[in-house]
Image (cartoon, grey):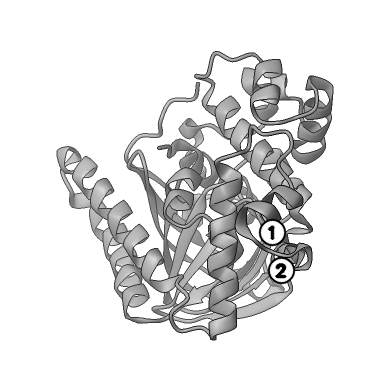
Amino acid sequence: MTSLCPPTTQFDTADRIDPIETWRERMSAYDISVPAEARASFRSAYRGWSLGTVAITSGVMTAQVFRRDTAMIRRDHLDQFGLFTQGVGSRVSRTAGQERLIRPGDLQFFDMAQEEVTIATAGTSGSMMLPRELVEAAIPNAAQFHGTVMRDGAARILAQYILSIGENLVDVPVGALPAIARASVDLALGCLRTVLRDDDRLPAEAYHRATRRQIDRYIDQRLGDPGLGAEQIQAELGLSRSAVYRLFESSHGVARYIKMRRLTRIRAILLENRDPRTLASLAADFGFQSSAHFSREFHRQYGCSPSEMRAGRSLQGVSTCSDGSLGALYRSIQV
């Protein structure tokens, strides 16, 4: 199992012969392109900290475009949630067909397991990465908020905290880092619970989101039931067939959503590689019809077999902590 990154990792293209290509390699979690007018003066630098359950980054860069697509998601297996804030400059983020402007002081919530294109001006920024399990324990339907930009009081407080901690962690004694990590997670989850709420939405939309959260919790508690599906949800929660399907339209249907939740849970188990169960047992325990069916679906989603992922061979070519890449920094955090 890959060891955790050291508390501090940093990188600066200023002293590199080919700064753009070197930055592409170190960024690793995104495909990078640079506008022609920014190439001559290109620079990107960051400092990152892995604090166990949370990773913090602080960076400065010239204009560039970040892309994360399905092929990259399947290749690097990063699935953390993140909070991004702009210090100086601005960004335009495109997720799920929506375009959002991120201005100084804004806070964006994003999901590394979903696609995104971001067009950034020159500026400074900070981010906080959190394990999926921690966020989904607090907000079961968190993935639905991918790309959301938050600007209320709680969001501004957290945005300023991320920028400040990214600038000042270098001077913090190592012994204080565990307490800072706990406080950072508590602050982030508290903000998300406040901001990603339904109170200010229209009554119908608030009802639909509350119902979807209830269904998500019901599904997660019964992933091992091979009969889990729309009919069972309808009967348990007293909903019509059409109501259930409307709620899962954005997830491409109930069956697909359930399958993805099962695959996501098993993938986390295999990456951690501490569970003694055989692949056949995992497939059965998570409701798959057979080991063969599970293996096919897993390979279709992640581009490797379950056994390859468990053995670590699926991560060949992916940066490790020692290279100082952002992908490795993100991968280092865990519950």
Q: Which mark is residue 124?
A: none
Which amino acid, mark 1? Glu
Spatial CA span between label 2 and label 1: 8 Å
Q: Nearer the viewer, residue 57 or 47?
A: 57
The structure residue drawn at horizontal position 54% and vertical position 58%, both measured from the top left corner, is 214
From what the image shows, is residue 166 above or below residue 271?
below
Are dots 2 and 1 in contact, CB under 8 Å? yes
- Residue that badge 1 annotates: 115
Q: Earlier in the sequence, mark 2 or mark 1?
A: 2
- Residue that badge 2 annotates: 96
- Crowdedness near tag 2: few (<14), some (14–19) or many (≥20) residues, C-alpha within 10 Å: few
Q: Image check: 79 left or right of 88? A: right
Which amino acid, mark 2? Ala
Q: Image check: 273 left or right of 192? A: right
Q: Image check: 85 left or right of 316? A: left
From what the image shows, is residue 25 above or below residue 95?
above
The structure residue drawn at horizontal position 69% and vertical position 27%, both measured from the top left corner, is 314
The percent coordinates of residue 260 (x first, y second) are 70, 44
The percent coordinates of residue 72 (x first, y second) are 71, 47
Q: Nearer the viewer, residue 41 or 284?
A: 284
Quadrant of the drawing holding the C terminus: top left
The percent coordinates of residue 163 (x first, y second) are 33, 66
Secondary structure found at label 1: loop
